[in-house]
Amino acid sequence: MLVLAGTALRGADLPAPFVVNLPFEANQATPIWLGHPATPQTTFARVDLPISPPDPSASLLVTVYFQEKEGGFLRISWATPDGVQVLSDNFFEGTGMSNQRSLLITPDILTGEGTLSFQCGDTTMSIQRIKLEWLANRSGLVSPLVQDLLVTPALGLTLSAPSLNGQPQLADPAAWHDQIVTVPITDKPTRIEQGVEFSVQMDNVPASGRLALEEAGLPLGKHLVVWINQQRAGTFSPAVPDLVDEGYFTGKNAPQTYVGWRDGSFYVPASILKTGVNAVQFSVEDDCPPTDGNVTDPGAAPAFPLAVKNLVLQLDYPPPTPDNANAASVPSSTEPTGPASSDPRASSSTSTEINVP
């Protein structure tokens, strides 16, 4: 059953999206609703965008492309004559990598002319690009099971408004749904290029499984190899965004890369799982197989930053019977511990325990 629900969509009568590439040329024109970006001389690098909302009912979707810095921050605020409101105290996700995130600014914040400010944690600007896109309220067909306001930009996936609030994203809790167990393995972005082993404790082997995640840093033309219990289980190829997406960057003398998170999923056959501790690891290989027939193994560490987040495992178990229904419990997880190594088989690990009937 589908019902009509309110969603945020770009209206035809609103201005087209505008991209600010930094540094911004002094003679470059801006839309009527956007003043010329300014970079005041302050202790911490800052860029100010004067904005006059074109419609009092419109929301502004701000997508920022930046280079994270270890121990640094990226603060976003909205300033009007009435005061300053911090929208995100730190937009960084802690990966230390090139990244992109989006922030939704609603009409109750955009009550008039103001300045959208981005302040970095040191003297150099970490932002390369800012995309500004006005969204209008529209009616759409949405499942009654979806309670959040949905946000649909001109390009990219539809997301929930709470995921665009500028705050650190929390993992959904583990849960049962009929015969499906859903287990979050990570609760924050995790660097894996030096090797991370994700361990899952199972009391019983499920009928099948599904592994879903988002990755950042994987070059175009490569995919992840999924290793389960030291066996090559298969490959994971993340989605390729539309080629006009602003996340594509081309560096000098460098191949084209995509800045941001790409998602995908992987079917886990039951034959490769076992009762007890199950180890999940990742390595990288080219989409085109090597001509000599050799394939990578989990000891091969990539030579580039690589991170995953929202790593979730779904397991399909038969419905609990009255005799063992009370034995089922929702799993718990821990963060990676120990130093990373170039060999994932002797690297840091994160563990999740799954108790099933």
Image (spheres, helix red, strand yellow):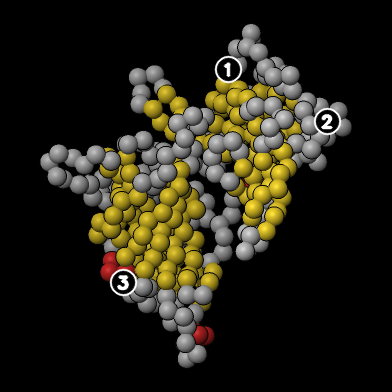
Specify which label sits upstream in the sequence, 1 or 3. Answer: 1
Q: Residue 165, relative to residue 259: is it above or below?
A: below
Q: Say which residue appears at 46% left-offset and 59% top-offset.
A: 312
Q: Position of residue 80 (x, y in %)?
A: 82, 29
Which class describes the residues within 10 Å of circle 1: few (<14), some (14-19), or many (20+)? some
Q: Say which residue appears at 44% left-offset and 65% top-offset.
A: 314
Specify which label sits upstream in the sequence, 2 or 3. Answer: 2
Q: Say which residue appears at 64% left-offset and 55% top-offset.
A: 142
Q: Position of residue 180 (x, y in %)?
A: 47, 71
Say whether residue 286 is left or right of residue 192.
left
Q: Tell me the quadrant of the picture where the C terminus can be found.
A: bottom left
Do residues under tags 1 and 3 come within 8 Å of each other at their CB atoms? Answer: no
Q: CA distance from mark 1 to mark 3?
A: 54 Å
Where does label 3 land, which residue? 274
Q: Amino acid at mark 3?
A: Lys
| Residue found farthest to the bottom | 323
Q: Mark 3: which secondary structure?
A: loop
Say whether residue 125 is left or right of residue 288.
right
Which class describes the residues within 10 Å of circle 3: few (<14), some (14-19), or many (20+)? some
Where does label 2 land, which residue? 112
Where does label 1 land, which residue? 23
Specify which label sits upstream in the sequence, 1 or 2. Answer: 1
| Residue found farthest to the top | 27
Q: Say which residue appears at 68% left-offset and 32% top-offset.
A: 12
Q: Tell me the quadrant of the picture where the N terminus can be found.
A: bottom right
For this rendering, which residue is in front, 197 or 216? 216
Q: Mark 1: which secondary structure?
A: loop
Q: Amino acid at mark 2?
A: Gly
For this rendering, which residue is in front, 168 or 183? 183
Q: Residue 9, relative to residue 1: is it above or below?
A: above
Q: Amino acid at mark 1?
A: Pro
Which quadrant holds residue 205? bottom left
